Image (cartoon, grey):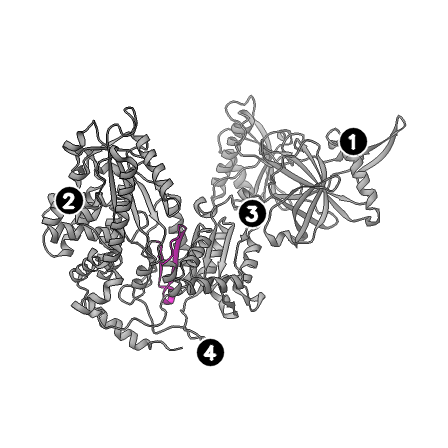
Amino acid sequence: MSQRVNEINAAIESIPDVEIVKPFEQGNIDIDGCLAVFVEGLEKPLAFNVTIHPQYPFKRHETETIKFSNDDLIEHKHIMQNGVICIHTAHSPILSQKLVYDIESVKAWIRKYYINKDSDSHYEHLIVPQKAFNGNHYVYFFNEVNYRFIKHEYGFVVYSIMNNGVFYKENIQSSIFQAFLNKDWKKIVEVDWNFQLKMLHKNIGLFIFLKEAPSKNQRWVFNDWKDFDILLPQDFLKFLHSVEKRHVKEKGKMLPLFVGYNISETEIYWQSIILEIGNFPIYGEKINKQWLTKIEEERTIDWAMTRNCSYKYFFGRGRLSDRITENKILIIGIGAVGSILAKTLVRCGCRKLGFIEYDVKEPENVCRSEYSFFSGITNKTNDLINELCLISPFFQPINGGYDYSEAFDFFIKSHLANTSIKAEMEKHLEDYDIIIDCSADNDLLYVLSQLKIKSTLLNLSITNHAKQLVCASEKNRYDFITSQFGGNILKFDVDDLHNPTGCWIPTFKASYNDINFLVQAAIKQINTKFEQEKTLRNFVIETDDTNCFNINIKEF
Amino acid sequence: MVTLPLDVYRRLCNFLNIIKMDKNKHLDSVISTHQITKEETLFDKYVKKKNEVKEALEEKYRNNIYSPFNSGSYAKNTAINTKFDFDLVSPFKRNAFGSNGTLKEMYEDVYDFLYEKYREVAEVKKQKVSIGLEFYTDSDGDIIKIDVVPGRELSQDQYKENENLNLYVYYRYGNIDAGSERIKTNVKAQINNIKTRATAEKDSIRKIIRLLKVWKNTKHNYPTKSFFLELITMKAFDNKTITGGIWDKLEAVLEYIRDNVTKDGFTLKDPGNSSNNLADTLTSYEKQQLSNDMKNMLDRIKDNDENLKTYFPENSKFKKEETNNNQYGTNSGMPIPPAKLNFG
């Protein structure tokens, strides 16, 4: 017996209330044994088969490398289909210590889910087997819709394929729901996504809303078609038959069927099943001189994957304050600062963004802004809108084309003295809740300072080498910016500007890291103030790399 | 494209840095460029409009109103030319809105009248204790704003004796709830109190009040009323030994506000009614914000004197004339810095 096996047996024997039922032995790869754990409240100890993988006491991809299983416990919470209980325990590089932690977790599981029969406050999704269908995995992304489905409502789902990717070692196709149609092909409700997703090629699937989850124990999804027997109405089975008949020429092609059910009073989840045309799990049977469609009970269900991508889940892990995300935002100037800002806002939950930028993206812009090399030379506005559509399905560009940008610059700068056009411009700008000027155009800064607009108006700009970032948010923003950059307040290098090839205005030197760091700090300051419902004051972010890198935010 | 060469610019910056900014000179220039006499044409427009509104109120309410009067900063000798505070106090008789008429009915009646009369030429807004008239931009690009403050005497004919009035609070006003039936005050006593001290101590109190108003005007909708700044300035002078140049005095007042406004039990007595505490016109949050703003201001000016110009800007409209006359500051005759130094 190896030293490792001896160590395991010895360590477990020393743990109170644990008894080794079958001593641990080295298998081909793993070490296996059986133990019994006693917890106050139990009539007798619970036995578990234990498998210890070679990586133990280290985890593998964030999962424990020790498995405690008991097939008799399968009906309880936090048990996998193979009877393994779910535990997540503390780290320890010492095997004997780790065993103590892990067995303590098993005891905690017994108390919480076996003895007390607790349930968690958050919804646990059904466990769906991840099996490939004809060598391919399929995943469908859905969004909440403004429609209340009724029990047994069925029809068609319009979906679009977004991408073919790789899922570990197999292929996977990702698609999005686009619309729900009733059985007569009449649109019930459109699924909202960004305009580029809405333009994707459309395919047809089927849906039925069951109301109840397709599960016997609210844990695992049905395994066989027979489980659906009493849930699927005859009308729907006939509908399946008619669809298959109509597509008879497409025999062998897959067709997704989406099964909807409530996971709360208002929330619906959709699971997907892959059907194969010509091989639907149904057959006709004449009963009392009437043809009925019946389910082929012994057939296994081919489940595919789904994801709820509605706004609250998509941004569930973190987003900016509602006072930013729920607003309509205009970004003027989408160079390095503006494009980083735009991308951050969209990643952080903002939906409605407009852009003003007359410039064209050149290859040398890519290294420090949010553009990609692949799209070559193109208007920055077009390019950024494409980039942002790839990130967020909820991004809605408002205005932002080249023509709009040119018209904006012309009108706002040429008609400052014309009170009626000025008033029109003010009205137009007030349509945005937040306007962020990242253009570093001092003429525009002046012109905007002459307008009377109720929107929150911010100005972000940086110094050479991104040593400082200045954010002006108050009425005196013109004076503030001109004085900060005037030479007597902020100290920065002016010798070392970057001169692009050709007759261009010199630009600043700074890397993506330099700029992004400052822009993120500025967004953090702005968001903090908004979140705390405090007034945002002008501020300057100063960095100092004399010894170790330091950052200092000075509020004015 | 031609810009000032960078080496020339750098030499210029170095030169400018050698000459330390004179804070007193700058502040004197701020005050002189904000003198109300420099904007006579605009000021006259305000007076004319104020008189029009006054006459309209008198015509509408005839025997039910005493003579409306201006209680704004001009009346108190603390005005600046970038924001004329024209508050037209309208003293109503006790039974002007019926013997059982409420202050709310007074406020609503005046609002309805002003709205009907001016809605096509001005934005008419309900404000904390007043009704704001913001006349649309005229052909010179000027916007005239007059605040009408309706008030009612406490009992029949009492106004003639002591000029006390009850005001109606429409919006939540600091810690004073919306819909509060009354703030009893004597606006004329308020005016006289400030005017007397501002005139007598014109090199200290008046100047500091004007500077604080210039600062307030760099903000959007600052919650602290000018009246609050006037009273707190006077209180600072009463509670601290404040001497030296104008900067020393301003600094001492800013420090006083920073250190005291959030203190428990801090009061600002209304000269029109000693039982009113003007400190209640700000919420705790607003007091904290005021204190923070003072702290930030003092810290930033300590970091760099030049920041003073951000908080207390000269009125650029009259700056050139001034700098030519008295050679103020470091930028007399200096070229403006070149090329872009801010980037996006």
Chain designation of label 3: A
> As drawn, is B341 to the left or to the right of B205?
right
Q: Amino acid at mark 2?
A: Ile
Q: Is residue A553 above or below residue A105?
A: below
Q: Are marks 1 and 4 in contact (CB under 8 Å)?
A: no
> As drawn, is A448 to the left or to the right of A249?
left
Residue B81 in view, yes or no? yes
Give A85 or A333, whichever is nearer the viewer: A333
Q: Residue at x 71, y 32 (%)?
A: A152
Residue at mark 3 to residue at mark 1: CA–CA distance: 47 Å
Q: Amino acid at mark 4?
A: Gly
Q: Are marks 4 and 2 on the same chain?
A: no
In the rendered image, residue A292, in percent from the top left (x then y), is placed at 84, 31
Location of mark 4 (residue)? A502
Location of mark 1 (residue)? A234
Q: Residue at x 30, y 77 (%)?
A: B7
Other residues around mark 1 within 10 Å, as few (<14) / some (14–19) / many (≥20)? some
Label drawn at residue A60: 3
Residue at mark 4 to residue at mark 2: CA–CA distance: 64 Å
Residue at mark 1 to residue at mark 4: CA–CA distance: 74 Å
Q: Which residues are magenta?
A: A450-473
Foreground mark, 4 or 2?
2
In the rendered image, residue B80, in percent from the top left (x then y), is placed at 22, 53
The answer to which image quadrant residue B247 occupies is: bottom left
Query: Is label 4 in a helix, a strand or a loop?
Result: loop
Foreground mark, 3 or 1?
1
Rendered-image quadrant of the N terminus of chain B? bottom left
The answer to which image quadrant residue B113 occupies is: top left
Location of mark 2 (residue)? B194
Of labels 4 and 3, earlier in sequence is 3
